[in-house]
């Protein structure tokens, strides 16, 4: 039996379909294969048995065919069509019988032909008379194949039965499809004419094979459907195609009749009836056989666009006089799909490491509909870790995209493995994929403790320091030895080549440095530095020479240092010889003498001397941000050894008292002295500013009249004297306190009244941000202020290039419903504007923070308020330093 790729007589059935080669089919690993249902089941496509075919003309063949289609797990039963069903041949003439097998899975299938002859027990069919094509994959993952049998019989072959046997794993019993051969004598002219006249009196309805193709149409690609109308007589035949949209709107898209094929004057029936003709393209063909038997075919090419059509039906009307009602209707549903396209997989790092989480990301785009299935594989195995998928986003072309991410910790065994991101439309067998390979994995070197030989190094005698660098990958790494920040130029370094451990595939190497220590090397830190894949790993060894002083770190007791609490700092000096030694406690460069207690030196059992020195103190605000040092000098030391400890004292915000007023009268003038106590703060850097309404009265930075309280924190009293005239009654006096170290702004306020009245004091309001914006909602407002709108800068010493806060009091209005516009020069201020009602109902305050430009000396600020059908405004010149 020979195999062939195409057949000329029935090319439309045996046309090779090229499969997409750039994506790998996962049909053997992705779960059950497709299920081939009967042609009348929902979703069935292609070779349907309909009215006028086997059901009426060959009932025995029909009964065989309707039994197929019961789906098995991982298998789909073929749909088989044997054509033609009646084979009548004049002797010594030639004819071909076709067996079309479609919609089967998997693609392993066997088609055999055998002959049952009356005059011979031999059932074999010559191999040269059989031609079987290669199996071709359909869009839904199933396959189709065609086998043809050539017949050239003699009269003794009349009545022979030819069987087509299909063997496939989905069949529990092998079905047999049969035809019976009728062989006639060559007819003379008169016999032929008589037979023709008789034949022309008999009508045959067309055998219809409609919608051969896939019901899933690829977006913006040309999709092909085939229609075959065979063995009909007489010639007049008309076909009409209709588009039925989801809203049930029916539109005629094409009409053709057999008259148009032979008579150009009848071309008005050969029409495209839908304006959107670019989407549908028809090619009809008419051919005539013997005895006035006709065959017609039509190729339909559809290029859909999901922006216009996402799903639709096509209805086919076949009009012929041999049909019982003169018409047969076939309808098929279609969906437009766009298979996903996958970008290259992106890795979250260029240097994957086993101790760091690795994220692989893949963008999946240009697919439709939005239901999609994704998975990740490592080589040929699925990865069990959960992967995240973003919500699908629809683009302007009607397609969707999303991103899937896989997070995991790579291991040494993953080196060289390929990771696949796979995606497919839901309900489809075929995956599209993108691959990424883990070419290398960075294992950070581990460094052992540095060993010294001899264990007690001595001045002037050779020593060797060594360490092992292990468990690293890749093998390339550099090792160098340093003293402090400089290389040991007077030392000899020996470093072995990297060696690989068979069990872990990781590398290790040993390095050592040899030198003769100098006096200046004592108490120095010797570093081994390993550079590996853009990372530097270090280990250190403190070189302590025999007979040289060894100075421990300063030990504070208690470890948490507080203001006003006793503190003891102690330091131990060991193993020095001779016993003459000089020690000092230092506050900066000043030698500390009070509170120092030193015990020793005393000789130990090892023949060397040691001592312990302590310094007792009570930390005050003056020790904020300070360190205390301990300095050791000895005749063997090239340079003194100094140890330091930082006194980690916290910054403390100030506590404000209420403002006190002391009224006095001098020569008829009334004056009042205002005083506020500022206490318990550290450090002493502070700024105190007094205001009368919006006018600055005084500005004190780092006042020098503070004192240290019992708790060792700063105490300060700030005073101001104010003339108390009649026009000053009701004005607001404010004291603003800024403590830079804690970034705290606080405020105290009260209203000036006559001596005969008590002075009303107001609770402080706290502002915990970088610019002064004290809450005005808790204040009362003077009568003068109520009558005018006023802008004020609330940032102390505003500077060019920095942010500046301003506020504007709007009298007699509420913030609700007010529209406030701030502008700087000609340009509106885009920063957030905040409006707050005053609690006493006198109006509201609008706050804003603006960004000034470097080099500006001043700028114009304007605030405009639209409220209660009124427009209020005020301007202000902002001076910058």
Image: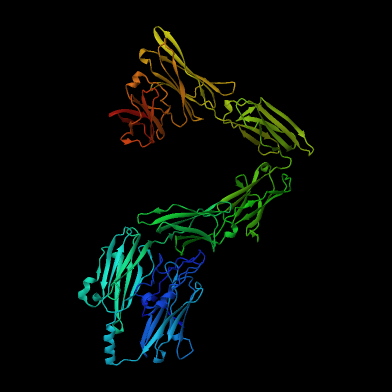
Q: Where is residue 376 in the image (x, y as percent from the top left)?
A: 51, 59
For the residue pair 539 and 662, the one nearer the viewer reads as 662
For the residue pair 877 and 315, the one nearer the viewer reads as 315
Which residue lies most toward the left here?
265
Q: Where is residue 81 in the image (x, y as percent from the top left)?
A: 41, 76
Taking the image as drawn, is residue 258 in sight? yes
Residue at left 33%, top 36%? Answer: 828
* Figure quadrant of residue 522: top right
For the residue pair 480 and 72, the one nearer the viewer reads as 72
Q: In the figure, 347 relative to 697: above or below? A: below
* Figure quadrant of residue 207: bottom left
Coloration mode: rainbow
Q: In the figure, 268 relative to 843: above or below? A: below
User: Is 715 left, or right, of 734 in this rendering?
Assistant: right
User: Is 235 left, or right, of 92 in this rendering?
Assistant: left
Q: Where is residue 732 in the image (x, y as percent from the top left)?
A: 40, 19
Q: Which quadrant is the C terminus positioned in?
A: top left
Residue at left 74%, top 40%? Answer: 547
Residue at left 52%, top 25%? Answer: 654
Which residue lies most toward the right here?
605
Which residue lies most toward the top here?
667
């Amino acid at each position: 039996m020979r195999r062939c790729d195409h057949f000329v007589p029935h090319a439309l059935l045996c046309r090779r379909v090229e499969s997409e080669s750039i994506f790998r089919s996962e049909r053997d690993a992705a779960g059950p294969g497709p299920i081939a249902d009967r042609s009348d089941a929902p979703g069935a496509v292609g070779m349907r048995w309909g009215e006028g075919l086997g059901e009426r003309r060959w009932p025995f063949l029909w009964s065989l065919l309707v039994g197929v289609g019961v789906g098995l797990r991982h298998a789909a039963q073929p749909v088989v069509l044997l054509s033609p069903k009646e084979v009548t041949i004049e002797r010594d003439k030639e004819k071909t019988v076709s067996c079309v097998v479609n919609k089967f899975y998997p693609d392993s299938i066997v088609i055999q032909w055998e002959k049952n002859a009356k005059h011979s027990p031999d059932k074999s069919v010559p191999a040269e008379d059989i031609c079987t094509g290669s199996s071709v994959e359909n869009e839904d993952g199933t396959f189709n194949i065609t086998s043809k049998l050539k017949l050239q019989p003699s009269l003794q072959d009349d009545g022979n039965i030819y069987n087509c046997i299909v063997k496939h794993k989905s069949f529990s019993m092998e079905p047999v499809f049969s035809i019976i051969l009728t062989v006639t004598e060559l007819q003379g002219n008169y016999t032929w004419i008589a037979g023709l006249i008789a034949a022309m009196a008999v009508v045959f309805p067309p055998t219809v094979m409609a919608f051969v193709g896939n019901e899933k149409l690829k977006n913006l690609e040309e999709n092909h459907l085939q229609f075959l109308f065979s063995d009909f007589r007489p010639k007049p035949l008309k076909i009409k195609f209709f588009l039925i949209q989801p809203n049930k709107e029916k539109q005629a898209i094409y009409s053709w009749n057999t008259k148009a094929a032979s008579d150009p004057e009848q071309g008005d029936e050969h029409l495209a009836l839908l304006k959107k003709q670019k989407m549908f393209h028809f090619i009809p063909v008419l051919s005539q056989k013997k005895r006035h038997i006709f065959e017609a075919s039509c190729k339909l090419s559809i290029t859909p666009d999901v922006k216009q059509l996402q799903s639709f039906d096509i209805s086919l009307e076949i009009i012929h006089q041999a049909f019982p009602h003169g018409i047969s209707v076939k309808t098929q549903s279609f969906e437009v799909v766009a298979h996903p396209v996958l970008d290259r997989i992106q890795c979250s790092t260029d240097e994957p490491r086993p101790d760091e989480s690795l994220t692989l990301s893949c963008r999946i785009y240009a697919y439709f509909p939005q239901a999609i299935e994704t998975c990740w594989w490592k080589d040929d195995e699925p990865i069990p870790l959960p992967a995240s998928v973003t919500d699908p986003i629809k683009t302007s072309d009607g397609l969707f995209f999303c991103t899937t991410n896989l997070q995991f910790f790579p291991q040494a065994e993953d080196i060289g493995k390929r990771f696949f991101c796979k995606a497919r439309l839901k309900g489809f067998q075929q995956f599209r994929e993108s691959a990424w390979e883990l070419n290398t994995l960075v294992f950070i070197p581990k460094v052992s403790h540095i060993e010294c030989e001899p264990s007690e190094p001595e001045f002037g005698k050779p020593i060797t320091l060594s360490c092992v660098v292990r468990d690293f990958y890749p093998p390339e790494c550099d090792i160098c030895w340093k003293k402090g920040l400089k290389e040991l130029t007077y030392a000899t370094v020996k470093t072995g080549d990297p060696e690989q451990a068979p069990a872990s595939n990781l590398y290790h190497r040993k390095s050592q440095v040899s030198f003769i220590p100098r006096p200046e090397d004592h108490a120095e830190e010797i570093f081994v530095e390993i550079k590996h894949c853009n990372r530097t790993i270090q280990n250190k060894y403190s070189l302590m020479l025999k007979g040289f002083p060894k100075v421990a770190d300063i030990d504070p007791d208690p470890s948490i240092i507080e203001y006003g609490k006793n503190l003891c700092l102690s330091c131990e000096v060991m193993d020095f010889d001779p016993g003459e030694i000089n020690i000092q406690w230092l506050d900066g460069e000043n030698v500390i003498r009070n509170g120092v207690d030193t015990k020793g030196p005393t000789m130990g059992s090892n023949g060397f001397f040691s001592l312990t020195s302590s310094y007792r103190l009570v930390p005050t605000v003056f020790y904020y941000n300070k360190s205390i040092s301990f300095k050791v000098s000895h005749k063997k030391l090239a340079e003194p050894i100094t140890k330091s400890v930082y006194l980690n004292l916290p910054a403390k915000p100030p506590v404000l008292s209420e403002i006190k007023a002391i009224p006095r009268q001098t020569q008829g003038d009334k004056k009042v002295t205002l005083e506020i106590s500022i206490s318990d703060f550290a450090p002493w850097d502070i700024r105190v500013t007094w205001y009368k309404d919006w006018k600055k009265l005084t500005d004190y930075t780092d006042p020098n009249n503070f004192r240290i309280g019992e708790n060792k924190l700063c105490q300060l009293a700030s005073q101001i004297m104010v003339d108390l005239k009649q026009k000053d009654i009701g004005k607001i006096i404010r004291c603003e306190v800024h403590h830079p170290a804690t970034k705290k702004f606080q405020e105290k306020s009260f209203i000036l009244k006559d001596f005969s009245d008590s002075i009303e004091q107001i609770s402080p309001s706290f502002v915990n941000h970088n610019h002064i914006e004290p809450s005005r909602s808790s204040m009362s407002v003077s009568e003068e202020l109520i009558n005018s709108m006023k802008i004020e800068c609330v940032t102390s010493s505003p500077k060019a290039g920095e942010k500046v806060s301003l506020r504007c009091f709007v009298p007699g209005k509420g913030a609700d419903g007010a529209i406030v516009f701030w502008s700087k020069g000609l340009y509106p201020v885009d920063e957030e504007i905040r409006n707050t009602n005053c609690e006493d109902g006198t109006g509201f305050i609008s706050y804003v923070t603006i960004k000034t430009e470097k080099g500006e000396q001043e700028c114009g600020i304007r605030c405009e308020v639209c409220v209660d059908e009124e427009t209020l405004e005020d301007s202000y010149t902002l001076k910058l330093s």
